[in-house]
Amino acid sequence: MKKASYIFLAAIAVLFSGCLLKTTSKPLTLYEINYKNNTCVVPNTDKNIYVESVKALDMVDNRQILITADRNFIRYLDDAKYVALPSEMFYKMLVKAIYANCGAKPSFNSALNTQRLKVELISVQILGDKAQISFAYELRDDKKSIKSGYVNKSVYCPDPSSVTIFNTINKASNQAIDELLFEILS
C-alpha cells in the first residue's frame, strides 16, 4: 500500500512540474495616453477653469486595451495595457492642455468665478479598423450650464499590432482634446 501511494505522489509531482514549466508569460508593454500638442487651438484665454475628476463607464475605465471587432465581439490586447486608468490619463491630459498650453488661469478648487469642466468618457477603444474616442462634457459656472456637448474622434488603424493600436488611440485622444479645447475656450 505504501509503495502505491509513493508511485501515485511521484506521478502527480511529474505532472505538475510539467505544467508549471510550460506556463511562461510574455513580457507586458505598458502605455500612457498623453497630450502632445505644444500650441493651443485658442491661444491667450483668460478663463478660470477647474477640471473636475474625469469619469468613465465601467467598460472603458479599465487598464486593458479594448478592441471591438465585427459583430461586437470584444477582446483585449494580451501583450499591452495602459499604465493607469483611462479616466486618470484623460484628467492629466486636460490639465496639461488647458493650463500648460492654453494659458488659462489654473483653478484647483471650485470657488466662485470659476468655470467647472465635467467629462464622462464613453469610448476609448479600437472599433473595427479605427481608434475611437468619445466623451460628453459640460462647462458650468456658478449658476448654469455654459456649454455641453459630445466629442467623437476616429483615426484609421492600419494594422493590429499593439504599438500601432496604441499610437492611433493616442492620436485620436489628442484630436478629441483639441476639439474640446476649441469648444470651451472660444
Image (cartoon, rainbow, N blue to C red):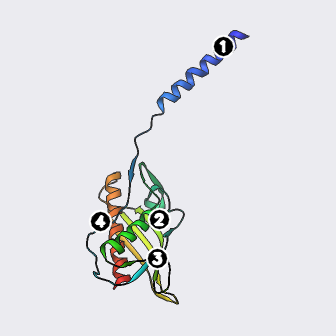
Cα separation between marks 4 and 3 = 21 Å
Q: Which residue is mark 4?
A: 36
Mark 1 or mark 4, whichever is nearer to me: 4
Of pointers 2 and 3, the one earlier in the residue sequence: 2
Query: Element type at marker 3?
Result: strand
Residue 77, above or below 106: above
Residue 76 lies, in percent from the top left, at 46, 53
Q: Quadrant of residue 9?
A: top right
Of pointers 4 and 2, the one earlier in the residue sequence: 4
Q: Amino acid at mark 3?
A: Ala
Q: Nearer the viewer, residue 2 or 89?
A: 89
Looking at this view, name the residue that lies furthest to the bottom. 143
Residue 6, labelled with which disc? 1
Label 2 neighbourhood size at 10 Å, few (<14), some (14-19), many (20+)?
many
Q: Which residue is mark 2?
A: 87
**Which residue: 32% across, 83% down?**
45
